[in-house]
Image (tube, rainbow, N blue to C red):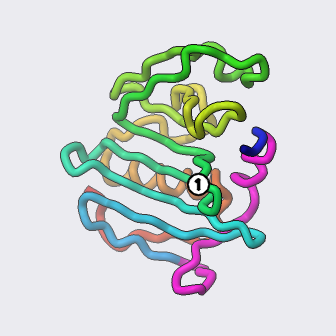
Amino acid sequence: MITNQQADILIKIKKRIVINNTLMERVSIENNFPLQLRFSLIADNTKFLWEISQSRKNNVKISLHFQDDENKIGLFRIDYNSGHKNPETALPDLPLIFKPYIGKWFDSNEHHAHYYVYGYKPLAWAIPLTESDFKVKNINNPHSDFINAIINFAEIINLETKISFNSHLI
């Protein structure tokens, strides 16, 4: 287990996409619906995994997931059009931001951000996107909003590799 502060540090350190042992300056994303991508990232000899997944049945059911790849600890995830239930009980040191959402059920229309919280299964806790710093609160336009969500996610995880898009996301 890691602390909440260590999780924050892992999210904030600068990292790059690695392809065939090469640190990438730029990566171009080619869309093949549904978009299913896995990127290996590295920062200070720490390996990470970034997954982007889009549902085959619902093109606006999207998940952006980031984890410490060596220890398989989920650090941050954004879910659009997906349900989730927060834990029913709070440990004494649960960060205040999560307390209003103890036991909360997020239905598939309530987009949410998952965070690592010490003492719980990784990414067990979520808050509504409306209460988060994540800029893209909704996927109204599956093309531009999805691209903006990917870009915003890359900013939050402090990805230095520049991302470009070769085709329209569906």
Residue depicted at x 50% and y 68%: 39
Q: Nearer the viewer, residue 144 or 16?
A: 16
Where residue 145 appears, x then y in whole percent? Answer: 40, 48
Residue depicted at x 24% and y 61%: 33
Q: Is residue 18 magenta?
A: yes
Residue depicted at x 41% and y 36%: 138
Residue depicted at x 33% and y 39%: 140
Residue matched to label 1: 72
Q: Tag 1's secondary structure?
A: loop
Q: Which of the 4 image quarters holds residue 141?
A: top left
Quick one: label 1, few (<14), some, or many (20+) residues within 10 Å? Answer: few
**Which region of the structure is painted magenta?**
5-26
| Amino acid type for the residue under numbered disc 1 | Lys
Q: Nearer the viewer, residue 82 or 151?
A: 82
From what the image shows, is residue 65 above or below residue 92?
below
Q: Nearer the viewer, residue 62 or 124?
A: 124
Q: Nearer the viewer, residue 80 or 47?
A: 47
Quadrant of the drawing holding the C terminus = bottom left
